[in-house]
Image (cartoon, rainbow, N blue to C red):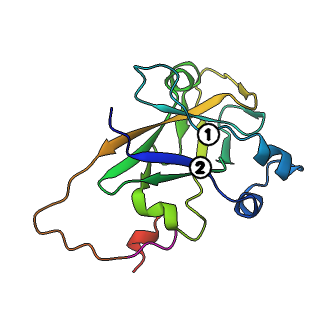
Amino acid sequence: MKAVARFEKVSLDEFKLDFDLAINKEEVYNEIKLPARATTGSAGYDFYSPVDFTLAPGETIKIPTGIRCFIEDGYVLSLYPRSGLGFKYRIQLNNTVGIIDSDYYNAKNEGHIMIKLTNDSNEGKTLEIQKGDGIAQGIFTEYFVTYDDQADGVRTGGFGSTTKR
């Protein structure tokens, strides 16, 4: 297997700016688990919830993970819901698939990866997540560009910042 990336925590200061789900932010920060694969055959790196939460049908929650990722040029990290959460509860990422570009690492927010989940259950199922439970999975993929590619922009933010020129 070829290694192309490295997960890290964002700084405590950045985490405190982005995280409004808990009172003791420093304690939550200190217990953040870096994403990891569960088995040698797993393609996805599990992202874990830093806090307990409940998500009733129709509700949405934004979870600042406290994680950033250095990614080599030519690769992208795609985020998906955990398969079991989607199958059992219809949990979805609000942006369907999260795309973490290699230059997001240097964004103003330190490349802080946010995961926004919605419980789209049509069976009335409420999701209960405990701190440390897997909530999403990330897969690294090589990508390619066109022969006439002229990209020369510099990223400063996230969430649509590359189209705001």
Q: Nearer the viewer, residue 91 or 64?
A: 64
Q: Which mark, residue 34?
A: 1
Q: Is any part of residue 158 visible from this angle?
A: no
Question: Which secondary structure is most common in the magenta stretch?
Answer: loop
Q: Which mark, residue 8?
A: 2
Dot 1 alpha-carbon crowd within 10 angstroms: few under 14, some 14 to 19, many 20 or more: some
Q: Is residue 92 above or below residue 102?
A: above
Secondary structure of the residue carrying numbered label 2: strand
Residue 134 among magenta residues: no
Q: Is residue 150 left or right of residue 8?
A: left
Secondary structure of the residue carrying numbered label 1: loop
Dot 2 alpha-carbon crowd within 10 angstroms: few under 14, some 14 to 19, many 20 or more: some
For marks 2 and 1 on the same chain, the one whose residue lies earlier in the sequence: 2
Q: Which mark, residue 150?
A: none
Q: Nearer the viewer, residue 105 or 59?
A: 105
Residue 159, position as x, y percentages in the image: 50, 62
Magenta part of the protein: which range? Answer: 154-158
Q: Is any part of residue 23 visible from this angle?
A: yes
> Outermost residue, bottom direction?
165
| Residue that appears at 47% across and 62% down | 104
Q: Quadrant of residue 155?
A: bottom left
> Outermost residue, right direction?
23
Q: Amino acid at mark 1?
A: Leu
> Outermost residue, left direction?
147
Residue 123, position as x, y percentages in the image: 61, 20
